[in-house]
Image (tube, helix red, strand yellow):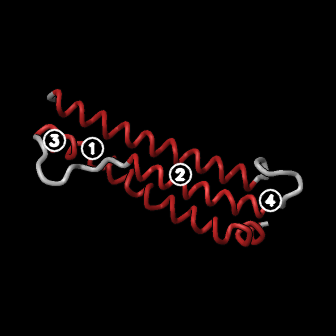
Amino acid sequence: MSIKTDYYDKKIRKSLGLILLMFIASLVVLTGAYCGLIKPDTEPTSIWFQRAGSLVTLMAIACDLFLYRSPQGFADLGEINSLKNNGSLIILSRVIVVIMPVIGTLVWGYGDLIYLGIN
């Protein structure tokens, strides 16, 4: 591997690592809100579960900023090789970035009903 390919490999892996970290954090927020761990005593859990959806949506926006994007137009050989080697990681990160705002928006809009329907 060339030095350039190693550079792009690290950049892609760092991007995926940040996205996975945000995804796990969003799951922790949703679980904590669902279990009632992050709410005031005077508020119903269903409302705070719904509010957690907005946090997941914000985390999804942040993940979109971390997403690795290859430059349009010219790319050097090291980047092209790195994109070929890490294609599945890039696809995984793009799938997560698409799923997170959908989940966040659904919970944000209907979280109270989802919570009441499950309990």
Sooner in the amino-acid sequence: mark 4 or mark 2: 4
Compare marks 3 and 2 and give the one earlier in the sequence: 2
Residue at which label 1 appears: 86
Q: Amino acid at mark 2?
A: Met
Assign the N terminus to one quadrant of the image. top left
Upstream in sequence: badge 4 or badge 3: 4
Q: Which numbered disc, 1 or 2, marks the residue closer to the eye?
A: 2
Tell me whether the residue at label 3 lies in contact with that at label 1, contact meaning CB atoms closer than 8 angstroms: no
Label 4 residue SS: helix
Mark with earlier residue (4, 1): 4
Question: Can you say whether 71 is above or below 15 in the image?
Answer: below
Q: Which residue is the extreme one toward the top? A: 3
Q: What amino acid is labelled 3 in the image?
A: Asn
Tag 2 residue: 59
Q: Residue at x 84, y 58 (%)?
A: 43
Q: Which mark is residue 45?
A: 4
Q: Residue at 37%, 55% (x, y): give it.
A: 94
Cα gap from disc 3 to disc 1, whole angstroms: 9 Å
Quick one: quadrant of the C terminus?
bottom right
Number of residues whose C-alpha sits closer than 10 Å to that of mark 3, classed few (under 14), some (14–19) or many (20 or more): some
SS for callout 1: loop
